Amino acid sequence: DTGVSQNPRHKITKRGQNVTFRCDPISEHNRLYWYRQTLGQGPEFLTYFQNEAQLEKSRLLSDRFSAERPKGSFSTLEIQRTEQGDSAMYLCASSRDFQETQYFGPGTRLLVL
Amino acid sequence: AQKVTQAQTEISVVEKEDVTLDCVYETRDTTYYLFWYKQPPSGELVFLIRRNSFDEQNEISGRYSWNFQKSTSSFNFTITASQVVDSAVYFCALSGALNAGNMLTFGGGTRLMVKP
């Protein structure tokens, strides 16, 4: 199996712009998770999908954030009207199913100027 | 609510020394999983180990070993004969087995620096 991939690896944007990140999970993994990691902290859960259904969202996920997983394959995370506080590493993980180990991608590092 | 505490924010050792990274957790779940991940400078979280709450056997994998003690809610990680390549941030994490989401709760991480 190839691992989880994420694109882009780095993104610099100006405040107020919209950005979109993509995550491709390990093939045949049903679950896909998004986490956010700020400098010097551990990752924090944002949201997860079981196939194409988004089943839970953290309160960290403001209404400027939206995630999709069409057809239960890759996922996108969009941030609208970015703010400097959105600067972080956005990590994607996938697992085969419920209670299975999550494997992480390399992350997308976002810097909002 | 779940919580993971890694009290050591940074550890520095000289190559070939043994080092133990501490992890203490809190959960109300009776069934749960504990994990360790490694995050090298490249940023990707690399899975190291998963234990379930019913299995308190210690585990050894090469130079790595893990000590799970339910009585003290700890899941400590020891690297024997450390090497420069072990330099990274290490995260301990917890997920409740009965939580449908299975999302991970991470500690703040311990930065390990191994000097030659």
Image (cartoon, coloured by chain):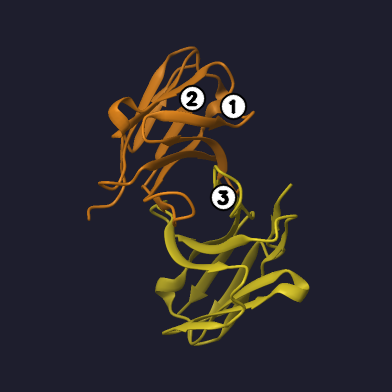
Amino acid of disc 1? Gly
User: Mark 2 to mark 1: distance in Å?
Assistant: 8 Å
Residue B98 visible to the viewer: yes
Q: Is residue B17 above or below residue B55?
A: below
Tell whether label 1 touches label 2 (CB within 8 Å).
yes
Q: Where residue B92 sits: x, y (%)?
A: 59, 61
* B97 vs B22, nearest the viewer: B97
Residue matched to label 1: A85
Q: Residues within 10 Å of mark 2 (few under 14, many from 20)?
A: some
Colour of chain B in the image: yellow
Which mark is first along the chain, 1 or 2?
Answer: 1
Task: State left or right for residue A74 relative to residue B79.
Answer: left
In the rendered structure, which amino acid carries the disc numbered 2?
Val
Give the colour of chain A. Answer: orange
Residue at point 59%, 73% (across, down) = B12
Q: Chain of mark 3?
A: B
Q: How busy is the neighbourhood of tag 3: few (under 14 within 10 Å), some, or many (20 plus)? A: many
Q: Which residue is mark 2?
A: A112
**Picture residue at 49% right of the left edge, 24% below the top:** A112
Q: Marks 3 and 1, how far apart in space? A: 22 Å
Label placed on residue B80: none
Provide residue A17's location: percent of width, then percent of height. 44, 13
Q: Given the image, what chain letter belongs to the residue carrying mark 1?
A: A
Q: Which mark is residue B104?
A: 3
User: What's the residue type where badge 3 is placed?
Assistant: Leu
